[in-house]
Image: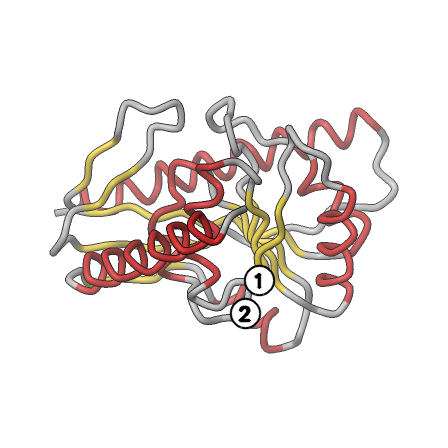
């Protein structure tokens, strides 16, 4: 990457953080179901946060400055996310289901075995939408990490026509951030049990989206 390209990407990251900080700063946020997650972090237990690609926008802001490692695709779209996230203290690991990830895989295992925290987009970078790829479960099996689903929704929002039905929240919205219960994956599961676990987690994460969306239907 040339100096000009590096400077351009750095500027994109600075501008992206400024806009998202200003945008989200106008909103009021309620947090639901984070007690068990917070307990795990206080105890120094390894955690893998999971959120769908379409619910990524607020997660970047919500989890900023916590020193979380983030698996980001080495694509151009991933570079935008990486530039924004790195300036907020995320430790960026580059890799995806469509690229070689041996190095990133080893880095993730090392991070988790030291009691660290990682965020993964399990249907990224290109979908299919809300299809949970099995890598996060295999990583949890090998490290003993807890899988923690996360979602958000807003009182004023729009779903874009992209493959991931990207959720865009409007300024001055009320936002709800929702955590699912931590999940442990047994290391000795056979292939059928593993697939059942993958499917259950996929359904749980999608139901968390639906629960977040329903939050503002209460009035």
x then y, percent, for residue 18: 26, 62
Identify which residue is drawn at 25% across, 31% down. Answer: 159
- Residue behind mark 2: 67
The chosen color scheme is: secondary structure
Identify which residue is drawn at 63% across, 31% down. Answer: 133
Q: Is there a contact, CB below 8 Å, between mark 2 and mark 1?
A: yes
Instruction: For label 1, count other residues whose C-alpha is less than 10 Å away and answer few (under 14), some (14-19) or many (20+).
Output: some
130 to 49, vertically: above or below: above
Mark 2 or 1 closer to N-term?
2
171 to 90, vertically: above or below: above
Name the side, left or right, on which 191 lies relative to 127. Answer: right
Identify which residue is drawn at 75% across, 47% down. Answer: 105
Q: Secondary structure at mark 1?
A: strand
- Residue behind mark 1: 91
x then y, percent, for residue 59: 40, 53
Q: Nearer the viewer, residue 199 or 91?
A: 91
């Amino acid at each position: 990457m040339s100096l000009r390209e590096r400077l351009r990407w750095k500027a994109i990251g600075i501008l992206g953080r400024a806009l998202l900080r200003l945008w989200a700063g106008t909103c009021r946020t309620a947090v639901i179901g984070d007690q068990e997650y917070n307990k795990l972090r206080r105890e120094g237990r390894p955690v893998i946060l999971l959120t769908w690609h379409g619910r990524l926008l607020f997660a970047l802001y919500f989890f900023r400055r916590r020193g979380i490692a983030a698996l980001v695709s080495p694509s151009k779209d991933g570079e935008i996310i990486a530039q924004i996230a790195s300036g907020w203290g995320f430790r960026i690991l580059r890799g995806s289901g469509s690229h070689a990830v041996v190095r990133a895989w080893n880095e993730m295992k090392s991070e988790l075995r030291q009691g660290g925290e990682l965020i993964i987009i399990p249907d990224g970078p290109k979908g299919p939408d809300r299809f949970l790829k099995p890598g996060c479960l295999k990583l949890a099996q090998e490290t003993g990490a807890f899988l923690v689903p996360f979602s958000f929704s807003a009182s004023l929002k729009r779903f874009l026509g992209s493959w991931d039905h990207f959720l865009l929240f409007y300024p001055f919205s009320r936002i709800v951030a929702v955590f699912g219960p931590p999940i442990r994956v047994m290391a000795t599961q056979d292939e059928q049990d593993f697939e059942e676990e993958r499917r259950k987690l996929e359904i749980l994460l999608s139901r968390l989206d639906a629960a977040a969306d329903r939050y503002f239907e209460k009035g």
